[in-house]
Amino acid sequence: MQLMCWLVACTITCSLGYLHSFHSSFPLSFLTSTKCSASLQKFLHTHISVKKSETPHSAPRDRHQRLSPPSTPCPTSLKISRTVTAPSCLEPTNTLFDTPLFYVMRAGAMLRCVARVATPGAATGTSPTSSSPTPMSYSPVSVHSTRHALRTRDITLRVPSSDKLLRFSFCSTRHLLAETIRRHDLLRSTRAHLDFLQLLGTQLTFTNLLASALEGEERVEARFTAEEATILTEALALGECRCHLGPEYNAQLEARGLPTFPLRVNRVLYRQEKPFSSVVHADLAELLQTSSDTASNIAAAATRASEASDIPLSLHLPNMTGRAPLEAWKSFFSYNSSLHAYNYLRRSDGSVSAVWMQSRIDAATLLAQGFLNADNTAAVSKWHHDEVCSDRDEEKKAQDVQRVLLHAVPLSFGVMVTPLAAGGAVEHQVNQLNRVVMEAAALLCVPSDGETAVASPLQLLVDRCAERHTTCQHILSLVSGDYEGAYQVAVAARQYSDDPAQVAAVVDPIRRALGVQDFVTPLAATEAARTGIDFFCRCSKQHIIDSLASAPLSTLESLRESGHTVHCCFCGRQHKLADVEWQVLKKTARSAITSSQ
């Protein structure tokens, strides 16, 4: 009876046109727990957004502009926003909202909707007593929907533990990897070297994990030389990332007597005139050496003296060689950035962190879509640029290629657990977690058809993440042991999620197999910080002209012979310079020569 009286009062209020006061009295939690019509929810959300928009917004970026770090090699250009908006966040429409009859009709619809939900035995999406919303589970039929694009968006995520002793960082770079492959035509230029492209995905992830600890326009620049090429990545804390490949590779370094696999990281920070730079190189033998070998090695002992606490650098575990063969470790070392990231965090940052990155590219999908030939080489016809096609056709072709590549990259993610003045006991637990996860990740590199192949405990988890797109929830559950907290974090991050009990049924046996079932750290889900990631480059024609102003005359002549076109090495965008602009550049170059004489 009280409910009906309240509904009648609401109807009278709406009919009088006091819509905003009605919204302030109507609980939003009630809407989420009922089966109201889509039009009603759109109506309410629209008016709520109108009311909120009347509040002036602050300008947090003003502080960043005043304290801005040294500018990137490319100045700011017009950025096209690609943020995917939730379907319920609709723009206000003012054509009908001033009509009293419209309010009465909507109030009547609301009354009928609530009456249906209040009927005994009616089904609801979420129980009124439930503390968490319904899981946003993945469905194959929604793969091309706007909601799917939102739930699978690349993100960085930072969430502290409840006791503030640990920080959990998660990153997904699935879209970013596919976009990098498309922009730089990497399937063709690398001759479809999928292992190297998976290494590229983990390096993109590592750079964004480092950038997630910064703020605003602070950025991380990473340069990593591998067996085939040098990977240069740049990521800003606000979610911009770009990448390209350099020609240098390990054999060239080795021929000059230089260490292989060098990793250079520059942090460009506020209030710092110069970047904070560090260069490390990982040695697989040192990372896997036994404790007795470490004690007898003078260089390793000196290194250990400078390490954080008394935890050794080596990842060696008892009977490790019997479980993970050396070939698996070599493959993991060459085509995954996890070991190099761990080595960097220990040697440069002095942090005893647990870190794991993983990327997967499905060759079968590329073969079925005609992007690979039967001999696993790249199909040139799929990447051929047709000069006859219009810009619109080229854009559509690029979208089709991106869609196929995205389907061929089911996952690309990374996670990092960082102690925050946690003490020796917690650091030892994190180090043990890192050791067992590294070994299980190395086992993923063992061919499944090998006679002595040992199945990785993580294989089922990785397959589940690739199938369900619930990587965020599953990976945070793995490293924290807090299934409910990981679910709440995934919901807050607007990622796909499953019921915590179903996730526990998959993850708990894996944690027991790894021996970390006692390492349980509750997550502070309400303090999670999420940032969307996009492949974005700030290059522009004007910046290219400014850069060429100091170029020698011979360089300008060679560039002019190439068709007056200059392309950005980071994003592949082409900029065509007019004859007048070339004449100005040549005049500037001649003036520089004259002044130097």
Image (cartoon, helix red, strand yellow):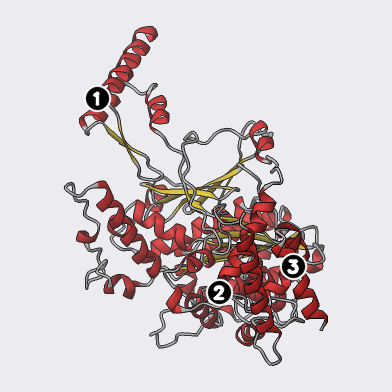
- Tell me the quadrant of the picture where the C terminus can be found: top left
Q: Type of residue at label 1?
A: Glu
User: Does residue 81 appear to the left or right of 134 in the view shown?
Assistant: left
Q: Is residue 496 visible?
A: no
**Residue type at mark 2?**
Thr
Q: Amino acid at mark 3?
A: Ile
- The residue identified by callout 1 is 557
- Frontmost residue, 517 versus 89: 89
State the image coordinates of residue 357 (x, y, percent, origin top left). 54, 65
In the image, 584: left or right of 340?
left
Towards the viewer: 353 or 243: 243
Find the distance from the CA under tag 2 to the CA under tag 1.
53 Å
Asked where in the image residue 104 lies, by quadrant, the reply is: bottom right
- Mark 2: give few (<14), some (14-19) or many (20+) Cα within 10 Å: many
Does label 1 or label 3 sit earlier along the sequence?
A: 3
- Judging by the rendered image, the residue that carries numbered circle 2 is 470
Whether residue 359 is visible, yes or no, is: yes
Between the residue at mark 1 and the residue at mark 3, the CA separation in whole angstroms equals: 78 Å
Q: Secondary structure at mark 2?
A: loop
Q: Which residue is mark 3?
A: 12
Q: Position of residue 62 (x, y in %)?
A: 67, 35
